[in-house]
Image (spheres, rainbow, N blue to C red):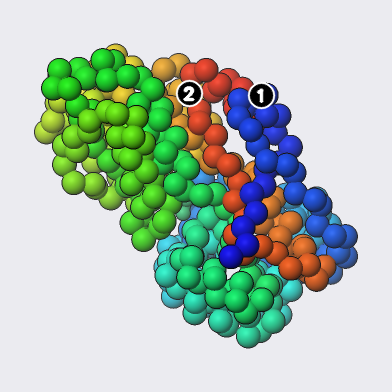
Amino acid sequence: MSKKWFGIALSAALIGTAMCAIPAAAEEADVADKKVGICIYQFADNFMTLFRGELENYLVDQGFTAENITIQDGKNDINEQSNQIDAFIADGVDALIINLVDPSNAPTVTDKVVAAGIPLVYINREPEESEEQRWADNGWNVTYVGCDARQSGTYQGEIIADLGIDAIDFNGNGKVDYVMVMGDPANSDAQYRTEFSIKAVEEAGLEVNALRDTQIGNWQQEEGNRIVTNDLAQFADDLEVVFCNNDAMALGALEAIKAAGRTVGEDIYLVGVDALDEAIDDVIDGSMTGTVFNNHIAQADGAADAAIAFLAGEAQDVQQYCDYVKVTKENAEDIKALLQ
Ligand code: GAL
């Protein structure tokens, strides 16, 4: 299966990591009269709001007219999204960019979009590898543009492991006592971050102790707050590290931590993913231990480039990944500057 890594014109020195080369600009395609349909799994999601804004602006920069770009809110409802896709097909859009409500629905969606002869770019929620293999085997104009969520989990775990067991082990039991707040469990980002964050801590040689089973916060700040409020009441000083699959939930957890009179960096640690503005500020002032930059700019631009390339008749690799970036106090100011 063909896979490509890409990045955008971020200064590698600035963000302290090696980014991949900028993808060759898609072949000039005249897109002024092309219609693109975009399905977002739900507008009420902080990260996907950033992603969506960048996608729209970049498409306009590439020559699409604003009237020819239609973005639909799937409202986290499979049926709603399915109707939106049907309507885009009936309307004869030239390309579709889809953030699935449920990635397991990819085969059905792919089949109908391919049958209509419309090139398709999946974003954010990656379909199964077997599904991607099917696109490759059939030579269809279908690709996934996003990040490899395993990497974000690993970076979260490394941020914690790098603190060292002596700094983490407030209760002196020799273990990293943690709780996990998970995003939408049907989403591979949530599954991989949950698994790989803990794996990275263990691989660094630290012993871990889950204080309870993983709880589901569905990417939402209020849920992160509710779950961690309960955790703090139940586990009190034994709770040493809070892992959240994204920043929205981590921001909710931070409110709970403050309300319980605890202090990140002094008697507890907290990590998220996304690098939302507010989370970066929290990393800068020490109230979050770290986060992981989920590069919405590279992903949105990469998705648009893939759609444009399909319109120009260029085949695409079925998996197109960009790098996450670890964000700690050391580079948080730089990431903030980059995003302004
Ligand atoms: C993740 C992101 C989450 C949420 C989710 C939606 O990549 O970290 O905050 O937006 O996508 O699928």
Label 2 sits on residue? 328
Number of disc labels: 2
Q: Dot 1: few (<14), some (14–19), or many (≥20) neighbours within 10 Å?
A: few
Residue shown at the point (49%, 79%) measured from the top left: 108
Q: Is mark 2 on a helix, strand or loop?
A: loop
* Mark identifier at residue 14: 1
**Res 88 → quadrant:** bottom right
Nearest to the observer: residue 139 or residue 71: 139
Q: Is mark 1 on a helix, strand or loop?
A: helix
Q: Where 96 falls versus 290 (above or below)?
A: below
Which sits earlier in the primary sequence, circle 1 or circle 2? 1
Q: Rounded to the nearest whole Å, what is the CA distance between mark 1 and mark 2?
A: 13 Å
* Residue type of the residue flagged with mark 2: Thr
Viewed as shown, does residue 283 lie left or right of 18?
left
* Residue type of the residue flagged with mark 1: Leu
**Res 137 → quadrant:** bottom right
